Amino acid sequence: MATLAPPVPDAGRDPSPAAPTAHRRRRGGRRAGKPGPVTYTLLTLTTLVSIFPLYWTLVAGSHTNAEIAATPPPFLPNASLFDNFKLALEQAPIGKAILNSILVSGAITVGTVLFCTLAGFAFAKLAFRGKGVLLALVIGTMMVPTQLSVIPLFMMIAELQWVNQLQAVILPTLVSAFGVFFMRQYLISSLPNELLEAGRVDGASTFRIFWSIVVPVARPAMAVLAMLTFLTAWNEFFWPLIALTTANPTVQVALAGLGSGYVPQQSVIMAGTLLGTLPVLVVFTILGKQIVGGIMQGAVKG
Amino acid sequence: MTIASQSPRDALIAAPTVVSQLDPDRPPAARRRTKLTRNNWGYAYVAPFFLVFGAFSLYPFLYTAWVSLHRTSLSNIDGGTWVGLENYRNLLQSEFFWNAARNTLTIGILSTVPQLCMALGLAHLLNYKLRGRTFFRTAMLMPYATSIAAATLVFAQLFGRDYGLINTMLEAVGLERIDWESGTWTSQFAIAVIVTWRWTGYNALIYLAAMQSIPGELYEAAEIDGASRWKQFLHVTIPSLRPTILFTVVVSTIGAVQLFGEPLLFAGNGTTSGGSSGQYQTLGLLMYQQGWSNFHIGQAATTAWAMFMIILVIVGVNAVIGRLRARADR
């Protein structure tokens, strides 16, 4: 998971909606000029292009090869979609895959948010020897490709006999360098030192300070990190493909199996693809606005 | 607008005021010193991260270098023989490596350049006072939420030779059907389309975030000088976005070097050769083929290191360009 944060100087970092100050109103984002019809046309076209392939899984999932190749092609789904769902579930263990993916992504999210908040807090607000070097190490490795670690990782899980077991895909992804950097940046600007001092004066232990002072302040950033991590973990492809088989797959491994196997009707592949994508599309429909906000604050690329 | 802007943080703004009122004479330097009291708690906080990180990222990263100096097979993982730089020599003499490197480069250019240009234009449009702003932004991020596997399977259908929608459309307007998968340029174009589709909206949002932090005064000044909208975009927006553009170029390039899932699933038969004549085999796919189809783990490790070197060179070149441009501006 190679991740980086963009050098966007406080972009979206402080869009506090309560008090739009004069300065903020004059920002580039809100400059004069109403968008014309051309703008709306272009944006609508882009929206169509963005959504069409997803809609097309519905259509292609409910028609046979011959029907889908007809001129003009069908543009509406129909009831055979449900038959194809059934066929897809027979071809690939998608039900099990969805459960596995929820488990894996959930565990990775909890671990990443917890460990990255702890480390991010230390890098933001605590002093200790070697801090600079350690932080440079974290940031430097953000550009190391996944390919560079899969071979020893595979040897490791083979040794531990973890091949095809979920911990093989959970453990290596349990932390993210991006997460540490993201939490550090957030805590530097939002956690006042005085608050920590007040806690210390009151005699609170370091861990008590973490739970009752740091975590409440960090919560909004933790939520953003959680959403982005879950999404990335759900879509993780390369390592799960190596560590798991279709006997105990995540959604992506099951889809890869479905797409690589011999399935004469493409509608079945499309129906399976839709099933495997549906959970994340539902989540995205509900939390889309927050995810957009999170990406504009700091970016992930998995 | 974002959840990060909700109340808990605002509620805390009062705290510093109280403290400084209690102790008005304390110089800021002293306050900084209290904060940086050295103790060992920091290690406890970073320990969980570095334990996992060390075991599953740092150690494998270094060990890959060690493996690349051995002849090791998947069936005989522990018993590799030391071969020095032989794997690297073989790699540089292998036509498969150069083929994959060339494909990675062309697909990389085909996907990264249009993607970032379109993202820039889109961000510009999204930066207007729009009705349905949230809707547009969210819709454009849908492809990012779609997994590589799902996106590739759908596009493989769309680009399919016999049943694909795109060929149906081509025929409907009187053009020839195209066998997208078997041609070199057509297959690489199709794969680049998948990548572009998944990442354009995401990059547009990154640019949008950066655009919103450009001070409005710059535009006002340009307007007073009589600069047109287009001139403003060229002479105010683009220069202000330069660090962000550089960042997205680096990130997209790193992604392009690692391209794997799209070429693996595009053929629809799960082979790792990247088409019947390797016409769209990328370095990522080659590495997977060497390791998990041919079981030559040592050779695969060498390819992985070659990929890392390429990334280092690209990042280095970008850093130099960034520095030179910054100096030229001064």
Image: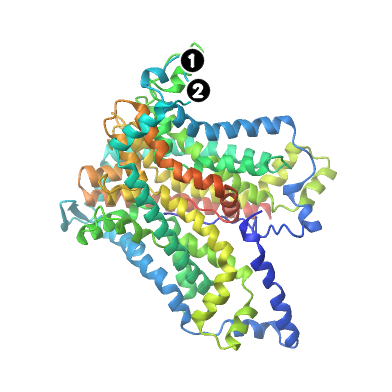
Residue B48 spot, x, y in % from top left:
40, 71
Colour pattern: rainbow
Residue B268 spot, x, y in % from top left:
32, 31
Kindly report the distance in space between the C-alpha atoms of the residues bearing marks 2 and 1.
9 Å
What amino acid is labelled 2 in the image? Answer: Phe
Q: Which corner quadrant holds the N terminus of chain A?
A: bottom left
Residue occupying the far top of the picture: B174
Q: Does the rendering let one see residue A21?
A: yes
Contact (CB < 8 A) between labels 2 and 1? yes
Residue A174 spot, x, y in % from top left:
39, 61
- The one of B165 and B253 positioned closer to us in this rendering: B165
Q: Is residue A7 above or below residue B102?
A: below
Q: What chain letter is assigned to the residue under label 2?
A: A
Q: What chain letter is assigned to the residue under label 1?
A: A
Disc 2: CA contacts within 10 A as few (<14), some (14-19) or many (>=20): few
Disc 1, SS:
loop
Residue occupying the far right of the picture: B224
Disc assigned to residue A215: none
> Which residue sits at x=64%, y=51%?
B210
Task: Please name the residue that numbered disc 1 is placed on.
Answer: A72
How many marks are shown on the rendered structure? 2
Residue A149 spot, x, y in % from top left:
33, 56
What amino acid is labelled 1 in the image? Answer: Pro
> Which residue sits at x=46%, y=22%?
B166
Q: Is residue A25 above or below residue A124?
A: above
Q: Does the rendering let one see residue B90?
A: no
Task: Please name the residue that numbered disc 2 is placed on.
Answer: A75
